[in-house]
Image: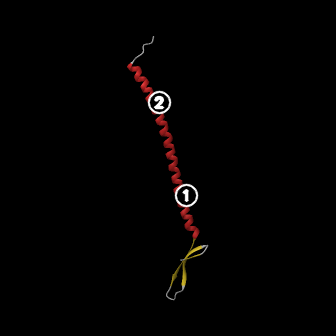
Amino acid sequence: MQKNNTFDSMFISVKNNSSRILYPRPKSLLTKMMNANMDAVDAENQVELEERDDLLIKLGAVKEENQKLKLENQVLGQYVEKPHVSF
């Protein structure tokens, strides 16, 4: 395979040892396809990271609410065990 700056060209040898171009293909086509694929993967990864961050924020809020409810339950449990009479 012979390369130049503009094209990747494939050559094929025939019986008389001469070569001919089978087809020229711009280098940038493969590069563009690979870049487009990487961009799609990067976009998908970005969406997954944003979803993960959203879930972590929600998880933090749920844990905070859970802790608050546990403390309230402890106070209410103590009140039930030792009822205060106030008049």
How busy is the neighbourhood of tag 2: few (under 14 within 10 Å), some, or many (20 plus)?
A: few
At mark 2, the secondary structure is helix
How busy is the neighbourhood of tag 1: few (under 14 within 10 Å), some, or many (20 plus)?
A: few
Sooner in the amino-acid sequence: mark 2 or mark 1 = 1
Q: Which mark is residue 48?
A: none
Locate residue 49 relative to residue 78 in the image: left or right: right
Instruction: Report the quarter where the C terminus lies.
Output: top left
> Badges 2 and 1: C-beta atoms under 8 Å apart?
no
Mark 2 or mark 1, whichever is nearer to me: 2
User: Residue, x 42% and y 15% (percent of image)?
Assistant: 84
What's the amino acid at mark 1?
Answer: Asp
The extreme right residue here reads 5
Q: Position of residue 44 (x, y in %)?
A: 51, 53
Q: Position of residue 9 (x, y in %)?
A: 56, 76
User: Residue, x 57% and y 64% (percent of image)?
Assistant: 32
Residue of label 2: 68
Locate residue 73 relative to residue 57 in the image: left or right: left
Mark-to-mark CA distance, 2 and 1: 44 Å
Q: Which mark is residue 39?
A: 1
Q: What is the quadrant of residue 6 in the picture?
A: bottom right
